[in-house]
Image (cartoon, rainbow, N blue to C red):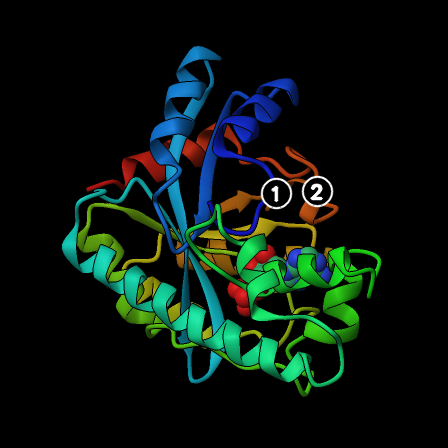
Amino acid sequence: MSDGTETPVQVMRAAAAAGLDVVALTDHDTLAGWDEAEAEARVLSLGFVPGVEISSRHRGVSVHLLAYWPRADDADLLAMMARTRDARVDRAREIVSRVARDYPITWEAVAAHSESTETVGRPHIADTLVAAGLVSDRDAAFSEILHDGSPYYVPHYAPDVLDVVRTVRAAGGVSAFAHPGADGRGRVVPTSVIESMARVGLVGLEVEHRDHSEGQRERLARIAERLGLVPLGASDYHGAGKRNRLGENLTSPQALAALEAARS
Ligand code: AMP
């Protein structure tokens, strides 16, 4: 329901086909895919974890905070994500107006590429550039035009990461830091921020992720051990939108049990 190229139902079918036992759906800043994903997972006898990837920031650095099992009717959590989704629309319009100075794309075309989604983002602008034949795929769109250091780049409002960890906890959810070492995408926060997050209730830390080098995985595993955080593996699957394959990294049953035990 955000920047994946498959529907929640298709993602559940792909997860079953990949041989997974349990899968989490974590769209950006929306819970809108939960119901249909859960219904399909039940049909497939697949364990389902309802989740979301919440945009947040620490001193201007983007942090993606995963929340598993938050209450779907928690007013503070819903208001937090609604504000971010609204800000994303204005920000996407601004990026498009900048890109349009050099490449022939329009906001209407981007809106058409994101009409079935709840959360608009740079991947939809990338899809528009691909459809116009201006770049070959999303990867090329990001590396040539849409990356964080580009003159076309505009950040969007996102809440402070410590507030998000607290809000997720208050909503009965379990939070985890997504791809904390993915420095190929842009700036990442220092270890001291992971420590601060742990103090206010962070539960999990992604260790096994495509965007982490072997050295980063070792470093993050040590940090998780030291801070008592649950080490997680993530596919970060986006359908055809990224090269990531479903199940390319896994979370152990013990880690899943530890996450579940942290639900309040
Ligand atoms: P945004 O949330 O609008 O700032 O866009 C960032 C999102 O774009 C990330 O969460 C990824 O899902 C996606 N993304 C980042 N880099 C790439 C890439 N090279 N290829 C495809 N998708 C990407």
**Could you tell me how far apart the alpha carbons at marks 1 and 2 are, in whole angstroms?**
6 Å
Q: Earlier in the sequence, mark 1 or mark 2?
A: 1
Residue 116 point in image, percent of width and height: 48, 45
Q: Which residue is mark 2?
A: 240
Q: Is residue 47 above or below residue 241?
A: above
Q: Amino acid at mark 2?
A: Ala
In this rendered view, identify the residue nearer to me: 77 or 111.
111
Left or right, 169 with reference to 20: left
Q: Is residue 127 above or below residue 258?
A: below
The local secondary structure at tag 1 comes to: loop
In this rendered view, identify the residue nearer to me: 55 or 4.
4
Residue 223 point in image, percent of width and height: 51, 61
Residue 241 point in image, percent of width and height: 68, 48
Residue 5: assigned label: 1
In this rendered view, identify the residue nearer to me: 105 or 202.
105
Residue at 28 percent across and 58 percent down: it is: 201
Left or right, 214 with reference to 264: right
Q: Say how many tags the image has.
A: 2
Q: Which image quarter is the C terminus in?
A: top left
Quadrant assignment, res 168: bottom left
Residue 117 point in image, percent of width and height: 47, 49
Residue at 23 percent across and 55 percent down: it is: 78
Q: Are marks 1 and 2 in contact (CB under 8 Å)?
A: yes
Residue at 38 percent across and 25 percent down: it is: 38
